[in-house]
Image (cartoon, rainbow, N blue to C red):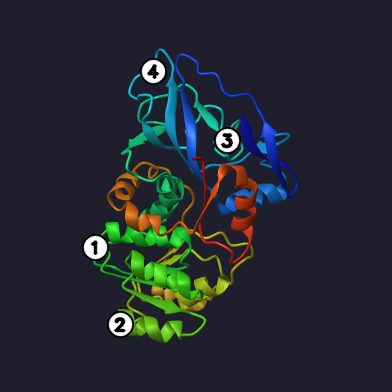
Amino acid sequence: MKSVYVTGPGTNGWVDIDTPVTGDHDVLLTVKACGICGSDAFYTQVGGIPPREGATPLGHEPAAEVAAIGSKVSGIEVGDHVVIDTTAFVDGYLGSGGAQGALSEYVLVKDFEPGKQLKVIPDHIPWHVAALNEPMAVAYHAVNRTQPEPGDKIVIFGAGPIGLGALLGYRRRGAGHIVVVDIISSRLDKALEIGADAVINSAEEDVVARLVELHGDGTSAIVHGTRSGTDVFLDAAGVPSVVQTAAGLAKHGATLGIVAVHKKPVELDFPNLLPTELTIVWSVAYPTEIFEVTDDIIENWEKYALIVSDTLPFDRALDALELAKTPGAADKVVVTFD
């Protein structure tokens, strides 16, 4: 079968590999869609994922159909549509350094355990939407890390897939007012369509003034200066100025969550931060959220569908990887197999 691998530093390619053989305790999946993640570009850049030696299979945002089950497997049936916990495979993380990748025609779940690696979804959920399950779990973990309370005022910096997924996650958690900040108008239009209460184009508007206008004055007896009434800030942009803006605006007791990947150190004004008692939390992956987010995707799949900007067929998977890593070319790229 065909599979996409990192074949060297900065190079991806097609590799012919054996179709997996289904053992007594295994489940064979036909991959139906697989999203492209920013980390795929990183894996390509560095030539694979240490400590794995040699070529590295790609693809860790899949949705699939059960093609075959072993004689001792129960709890799942051939033909079931499933989303996948790519961190729960016994042969390593799927598409992130393990033995298999989901930019392949088939994937084998070895030693299947009901409720561990797979979750069945209704047949009416489009494959390209189901493939959002993994990145949306990343976004929902970021939401959970910031511990929002019902009615909280939220600001999300960055209207890419994770920021938009967080928007839906905060809505699920009962947020009172959500503002999304970005520099690309089309992304902000999408945020409004998905459910943001307000948006700010930081390339054209005064972010500080607008947030005070939208979320009220957050100054207090111990925190002075210009402060907004925002309860939770989430950095899904990865730009130093975002963290600095949020920290400079934070009222006493606010929370700042960091889910974006920063490539350089960020300087913060600790003397001015001290009286705010700002809580800064970090978020990576999805310890528990991989299947928690699935029900929300099922219930609101039309809104999640808006996050996908481009779909390309499997035979153009290499083009999809190039498109996804090109700044400004696409927001969320998904490879489809039908």
Q: Is residue 277 visible?
A: no
- Of the numbered discs 4 and 1, the one sitting upstream in the chain is 4
What kind of residue is marked 2?
Answer: Gly
Q: Residue at x 42, y 55 (%)?
A: 139
- Tell me where residue 236 appears, x and y as whole percent: 48, 63
Q: Who is closer to the viewer here, 212 or 251?
A: 212
As drawn, is 247 to the left or to the right of 53?
Answer: left
Q: Amino acid at mark 3?
A: Ser
| Vertical arrangement, residue 21 with respect to residue 243, above or below | above
Label 3's element?
A: loop
Residue type at mark 1?
Pro
Distance Cα–Cα, label 2 vs label 3: 51 Å
Sequence order check: which comes first, mark 1 or mark 3? Answer: 3
- Residue 258 location (% of width, % of height): 48, 61
Identify the residue under disc 3. 104
Label 3 CA crowd tier, 10 Å (few <14, some 14–19, many 20+): many
User: Which residue was labeled with disc 2?
Assistant: 216
Nearer mark to the viewer, of 2 and 3 = 3
Residue at the spot of label 4: 73
**Label 1: which secondary element:** loop
Local crowd size for mark 4, using a 10 Å CA cut-off: few (<14), some (14–19), many (≥20): some
Q: Earlier in the sequence, mark 3 or mark 4?
A: 4
Q: Nearer the viewer, mark 1 or mark 3?
A: 3
Q: Which residue is mark 1?
A: 150
Does the CB distance between marks 4 and 1 fall below 8 Å? no
